[in-house]
Image: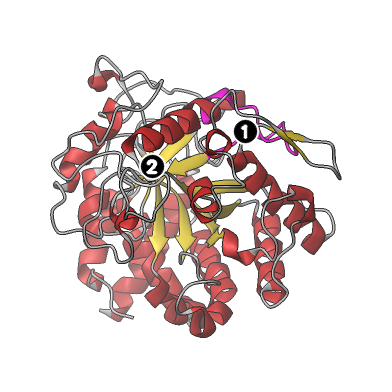
């Protein structure tokens, strides 16, 4: 697998990894997906200030592009980076490849870039290459986790995976009846076993918009938009009361996990959710008004930190899709209009009920050097493990060991 860094460049950047840790992230549990499938986006250096303008201090990336990671250095923005699908076979079958990827794309940017997790692939089990990649997913997760452990990073950087709701055999109505697809169950059980053993969450891409657009006559718009006054749905099997469709979708995954693993024990977090501001004539509900309502309600919902009806003690954590409209995405018009911002950096719409910070320089997303801002229960990191508070002696020893190995191979 070709890497962007040569071994010599990696040696130089590893030295930077021994610098002082970055500032802590803001307490908000909401994040945003920073996709870059476009040819007209602003430079990465301008992104932290845009995030600060809406009070977001957490970002999910789909790769680990060095220019982007450098742009977030010393900002305190908490990052989830991605191991791209194309890298899975090499990382799954060669522990040395996993170690080199972790060194070049994670360790080399710490602690200036606050990387707290790596997602291995995206929707691997249900994507276009699922037949060829599915068998590599868990081995790649295992090897990457082992590589991070060898580098002294497994307590600071979680390894996870993100999946679409297409892994479910039944939809989220009612949530209690949901199970995983039988053909995917062998893979899913191994994934759940990994998450349970390492303490990492399962990521799901949950979109009430698609459920509404597919059947607007049966799915109430205000229920899909997470409106506080929407008529609630009561699951007849559990008696749980669902006031919005996103809660139902997340709890559907929890029920499927319980069914597959005989008890659960894995936390579910929303890696993607959002609403398009434009669409084709047949894309019902794709309007800027609905997008503003959905994403505004989502941020309010996440900030409440109450959790879903099934797991009220676990706060809902979610990433909005997406930061920008991306003009090179394939598919219907809606695919290119999920952004909170236009490519020129202006808001696509005003988020409903979300106050814009008066001074973006005061937020965690605008710069380092701020004091620690704790999250719920005193957490300073998204995964209760944070690059702002690592085990430095352990990490320094791992860096030195890796440098020695690389020097011997030059």
For the residue pair 227 and 344, the one nearer the viewer reads as 227
| Secondary-structure class at tag 1 | loop
Q: Viewed as shown, does residue 288 lie left or right of 123?
A: left
Residue linked to disc 2: 32
> x and y percent of residue 136 in the render?
54, 79
Residue linked to disc 1: 315
> x and y percent of residue 148 in the render?
49, 60
Give the dominant element type of the magenta stretch: helix, strand or loop: loop
> x and y percent of residue 380 in the render?
50, 30
Q: Residue at x 32, y 42 (%)?
A: 277
Is residue 57 visible in the rendered structure shown here? no
- On whether residue 303 falls in the magenta region, the answer is yes
Q: Give the residues drawn in magenta, as a range.
A: 302-317
Q: Viewed as shown, does residue 403 lie left or right of 221?
A: left
Few, some or many C-alpha atoms within 10 Å of disc 1 (few <14, some 14-19, many ≥20)?
A: some
The residues bearing labels 2 and 1 have C-alpha atoms spaced at a distance of 17 Å
Q: Residue at x 26, y 64 (%)?
A: 11
Q: Residue at x 50, y 43 (%)?
A: 391
Numbered label tally: 2
């Amino acid at each position: 697998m070709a890497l962007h860094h040569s071994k010599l460049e990696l040696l130089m950047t590893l030295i930077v990894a021994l610098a002082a840790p970055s500032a802590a992230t803001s307490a908000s549990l909401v994040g945003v997906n920073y996709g870059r499938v476009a040819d007209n986006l602003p430079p990465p250096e301008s992104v932290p200030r845009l995030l600060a303008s809406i009070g977001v201090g957490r970002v999910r990336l789909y790769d680990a592009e060095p220019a982007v990671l450098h742009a977030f250095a010393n900002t305190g923005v908490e990052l989830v980076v991605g191991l791209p699908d194309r890298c899975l076979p090499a990382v799954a079958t060669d522990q040395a490849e996993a170690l080199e990827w972790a060194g070049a794309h994670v360790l080399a940017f710490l602690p200036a870039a606050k990387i707290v997790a790596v997602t291995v692939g995206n929707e691997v089990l249900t994507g276009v290459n699922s037949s060829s990649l599915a068998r590599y997913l868990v081995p790649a997760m295992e090897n990457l986790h082992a590589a991070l452990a060898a580098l002294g990073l497994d307590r600071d950087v979680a390894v996870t995976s993100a999946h679409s709701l297409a892994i479910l055999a039944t939809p989220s109505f009612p949530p209690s009846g949901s199970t995983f697809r039988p053909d995917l169950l062998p893979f899913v059980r191994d994934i759940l076993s990994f998450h349970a053993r390492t303490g990492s969450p399962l990521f799901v891409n949950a979109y009430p918009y698609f459920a509404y657009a597919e059947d607007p006559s049966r799915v109430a718009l205000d229920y899909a938009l997470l409106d506080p006054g929407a008529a609630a749905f009561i699951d007849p099997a559990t008696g749980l009361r669902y006031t919005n469709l996103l809660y139902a979708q997340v709890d559907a995954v929890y029920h499927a996990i319980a069914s597959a693993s005989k008890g659960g024990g894995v936390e579910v977090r929303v890696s993607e959710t959002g609403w398009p501001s434009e669409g084709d004539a047949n894309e019902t509900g794709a309007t800027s008004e609905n997008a503003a309502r959905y994403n505004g309600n989502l941020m309010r919902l996440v900030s409440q930190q109450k959790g879903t009806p099934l797991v009220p003690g676990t706060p809902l954590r979610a990433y909005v899709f997406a930061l920008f409209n991306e003009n090179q995405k394939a598919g219907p018009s809606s695919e290119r209009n999920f952004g909170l911002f236009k490519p020129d950096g202006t808001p696509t719409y005003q988020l409903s009920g979300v106050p814009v910070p008066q001074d973006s320089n005061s937020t965690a997303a605008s710069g380092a050097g701020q004091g620690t801002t704790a999250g719920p229960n005193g957490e300073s990191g998204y995964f209760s493990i944070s690059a702002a508070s690592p085990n430095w002696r352990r990490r320094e020893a791992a860096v030195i060991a890796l440098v020695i190995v690389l020097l011997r191979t030059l």
